[in-house]
Structures are given as C-alpha cells and as structure tokens.
Amino acid sequence: MTATLDSSAPTAIGEIPSFNVTIRLRRYLPETDRGDESYWEEFVVPVHGTDRVLDALHKIKWEQDGSLTFRRSCAHGVCGSDAMRINGRNRLACKTLLKDVNPDKPITVEPIKGLPVIKDLVVDMEPFFASFREIMPFLITTGNQPSGERIQSAEQRERFDDTTKCILCAACTSSCPVFWTDGQYFGPAAIVNAHRFIFDSRDEGAEQRLEILNDKEGVWRCRTTFNCTEACPRGIEVTKAIQEVKRAMITRAF
C-alpha cells in the first residue's frame, strides 16, 4: 500500500492534511510460538507530513498493537535511545521525518544490527556499554584535588569538542561491518569516547587508553568504510576521530 492523501476529508483552515503510510516492522516476540524467529508485519497508519517515524510507532502501539516494543525517552534527539534501522539506514526515530523517507513506499523499520534482539526493536545494549566502560570514559588525574576548576583554553577545548557530542545511541557502532562480524571489536562509539579524553589537556590517562585500544580488537580493526560517520545523528566526524587515535598511537611508539 502506498501513502495517499485523504482528499475526501474536509480540513480546517491551517490544518495539516493527513495521509496513510505503510510501516513494515521486523517483529521478534520471544513469548509466542514464533519466538525462535523474527518476521515482518505491516501496519497502515494515518499521519501528517510533519510527523516523525517515532510518531508512527506510537500510533501503532497505542491504537493498533500494544505488544509492539521499542525504546524512546526524550523524543528530541538527546537521549539516543530510539536508534533503529529505517529503510536500511541507522537513524533516530525521533529525528526522522516520514516525508524524508519516501512515504510513497512501505517504510521498513528494524532493530540495529550486531546486538542481540530482546524483543521487536529492542536490543541488548550491554555488549556496547561494556566496550564503553573499558576505555575508562572519565577524567583521570593525579596529585592533590584542586581547590578550583581545572583551567582549559578555548583552543584546548576545541581539540576534542566534536567527540563530546556523543549520545551513546550505538548508531555508529551498529552500522560498522566489522562490528557485525566480530563481537570483540570495541566499535566506533567506544573509540570516539576514548578520543574525547585522550586529547583533553586536563586528563592524564591517555597512555592507558591508547594501550587498551592497541589490542588486536581495538582501533586497528577499523577499515575506514565511513559507515559510522554517515550514521551519526549528531554529525560527529567519527572516522576522523578514529584516525587521530591511530596517529596518536604511532606518535607514541616513536
């Protein structure tokens, strides 16, 4: 079924006309007799041109099938909890307008790849966060606790400003072909968060993080496909950050 404008229904002045879209969902319901496999299910949803994919998912859950399961929280692209594959690309459902993903054809929605599916669009994020924790995503300092703030110039801050934007949505990591096939690879998000501290002038743990990422499943597993950069909803230059970490390792070696 294609998206069709309902011209028969009268609209008030200034009211946005509605139309129908077909949402094709990959379902996985472990508690049913089909719990050992996933399957596709289609829903026809009345929407407006300004609606997002998240709005369509809400309508399905609230009005058609209450068993549909997905994550969402802030609904404004800050929490990163609603990352999913939409028409074959990793996106945030709350930031993706239906009109921008060709509503004239069924819109496919499925869970992000490379992580175990728990139910429908919800995946187990623990492997992702395990890699994040391993790179020690916190400020490491030595000596006495300072009596005031740790001063940093605008230029020093700018050096790592891009990688502070990460919202841990896993869109970059789950778009990486290496991550799909290698469950041990740290993944782009962990490296991005390591970058944020490696180049922080106030931090003293760069050597430790570089040593961790120098592992065979660390930064050298990156194949520079740029999938991660294209998937990032915050516009972080993920591939560039990974390359800078690689250069820091080479510089350290010499």
Image: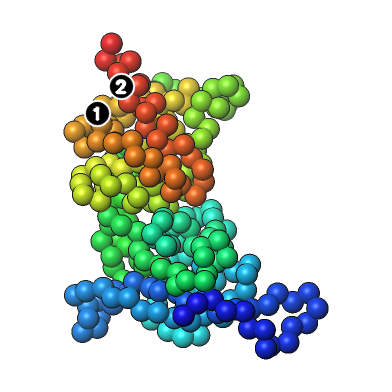
Q: Name which residue lies at 24% across and 83% down.
A: 32
Q: Name which residue lies at 28% across and 65% down.
A: 117
Q: Amino acid at mark 2?
A: Met
Residue 225 is drawn in which quadrant?
top left
55 or 74: nearer the eye?
A: 55
Question: Residue 159: x percent and y percent?
Answer: 51, 25
Q: Name which residue lies at 62% across and 69% down.
A: 49
Relative placement, left or right, of 34 versus 160 is: left
**Gap between marks 1 and 2 measured at Cα:** 8 Å
Looking at the image, is mark 1 or mark 2 earlier in the sequence? 1
Q: Is residue 194 above or below residue 178?
A: above
Q: Is residue 207 above or below residue 103?
A: above
- At mark 1, the secondary structure is loop
Question: For mark 1, what is the residue?
Answer: 214
Labels 1 and 2 touching (C-beta < 8 A): yes
Relative placement, left or right, of 153 versus 81 is: right
Question: For mark 2, what is the residue?
Answer: 249
Locate the C terminus by quadrant: top left
Q: Name which residue lies at 68% across and 88% down.
A: 9
- At mark 2, the secondary structure is helix
Classify 10 Å Cα crowding around label 2: few (below 14), some (14-19), many (20 and above).
some
183 or 181: nearer the eye?
A: 181
Q: Is residue 66 above or below residue 231?
A: below
Relative placement, left or right, of 115 versus 6 is: left
Residue 122 is drawn in which quadrant?
bottom left
Q: Amino acid at mark 1?
A: Asn
Q: Which mark is residue 140?
A: none
